[in-house]
Image: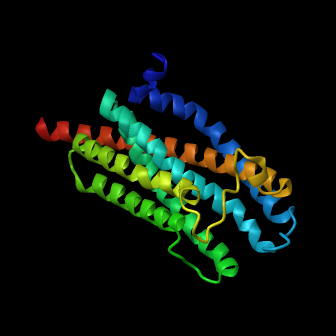
């Protein structure tokens, strides 16, 4: 555990991530290309949903990452509040735009998927509504960081907002279990094998999910490195003004 905290040092973090990012980027590209090509071009149409089922390879990974990105931000925010490690606060900030993008992708692909299935682009379904609110929390989180000049105060306040928004992250994941009513289908992936999609869709979906996870990690590491360098530049400029 002691060795893990060494990466809270910004210099150590930048050095280590700089070494692993090239390989991580290659793995990300390979997983995304393999999963999407396999899913869109080498799987059959569903007997009920036809070819529209293939949007699952974008919708499900994006929705999973939108929720888990917020949970990652929660963990990083708690580390900041307890340990006051600046890298964790900057990592949470770096993850927010990526999570928001995943949320938008999930909402748009869900609407495209839902229209031919439900006959409407949108419904105030419990899961859809909680997911939309989660997207608004992402916007509020990003805006709060931008509105407060003192970075430590911004990190404190956004950490509190992150804890509140985590309620909707959990609801987005488990709303179909909390409420039986609603148009949204059950989970595509589950610990119960009977609830999973058929194997012909399941395995390429797993590859796509792996690709989205790797994409998220890659983008967050890149953005965190950028946030660290931006903070260094601000500190240097502040010192020059004081000199």
In the rendered structure, the answer to whether residue 25 lies left or right of residue 125 reads right
- Where is 43 relative to 122, above or below? above
| Image quarter of the C terminus | top left
**Pick the front one: 77 or 215:** 77
Number of marks drawn: 0
Q: Determine the image quadrant of residue 181.
A: bottom right
- Where is 32 relative to 184, above or below? above
Residue farthest top in this picture? 2
Q: Where is residue 110 in the image (x, y as percent from the top left)?
A: 61, 69
Residue farthest front in this picture? 180
In the rendered structure, the answer to whether residue 189 lies left or right of residue 69 reads right
Q: Residue sitting at 81 percent across and 74 percent down?
A: 50
- Where is 101 relative to 123, above or below? above
Is residue 169 in sight in this rendering? yes
Residue farthest bottom in this picture? 119
In the rendered structure, the answer to whether residue 8 lies left or right of residue 60 reads left
Q: Residue sitting at 37 percent across and 32 percent down?
A: 79
**Pick the front one: 92 or 120:** 120
Q: Position of residue 111 (x, y in %)?
A: 60, 74
In the rendered structure, the answer to whether residue 151 lies left or right of residue 43 reads left
Q: Where is residue 138 in the image (x, y as percent from the top left)?
A: 40, 58
**Pick the front one: 90 or 176:** 176
Residue farthest left in this picture? 242
Is residue 84 in sight in this rendering? no
Q: Determine the image quadrant of residue 188.
A: bottom right
Q: Residue sitting at 84 percent across and 53 percent down?
A: 199
Q: Position of residue 192 (x, y in %)?
A: 73, 46
């Amino acid at each position: 555990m002691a060795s893990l905290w060494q990466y809270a040092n910004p210099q150590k973090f930048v050095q280590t991530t700089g070494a692993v990012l090239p390989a991580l980027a290659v793995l990300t590209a390979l997983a995304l290309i393999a999963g999407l090509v396999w899913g869109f071009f080498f799987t059959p149409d569903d007997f009920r949903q036809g070819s529209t089922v293939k949007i699952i390879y974008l919708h499900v990974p994006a929705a999973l990452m939108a929720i888990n990105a917020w949970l990652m931000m929660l963990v990083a925010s708690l580390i900041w509040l307890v340990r006051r490690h600046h890298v964790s606060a900057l990592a949470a900030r770096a993850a927010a735009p990526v999570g928001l993008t995943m949320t938008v992708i999930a909402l748009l692909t869900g609407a495209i998927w839902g229209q031919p299935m439900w006959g409407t682009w949108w419904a105030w379904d419990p899961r859809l509504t909680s997911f939309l609110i989660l997207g608004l929390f992402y916007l509020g989180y990003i805006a709060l960081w931008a509105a407060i000049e003192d970075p430590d105060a911004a990190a404190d306040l956004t950490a509190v907002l992150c804890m509140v928004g985590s309620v909707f992250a959990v609801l987005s994941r488990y709303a179909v279990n909390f409420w039986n009513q609603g148009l949204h289908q059950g989970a595509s992936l589950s610990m119960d094998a009977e609830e999973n999609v058929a194997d012909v869709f399941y395995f390429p979906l797993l590859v796509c999910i792996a690709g989205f996870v790797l994409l998220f990690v890659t983008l967050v590491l890149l953005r965190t490195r950028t946030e660290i360098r931006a903070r260094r530049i601000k500190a240097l400029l502040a010192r020059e003004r004081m000199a």
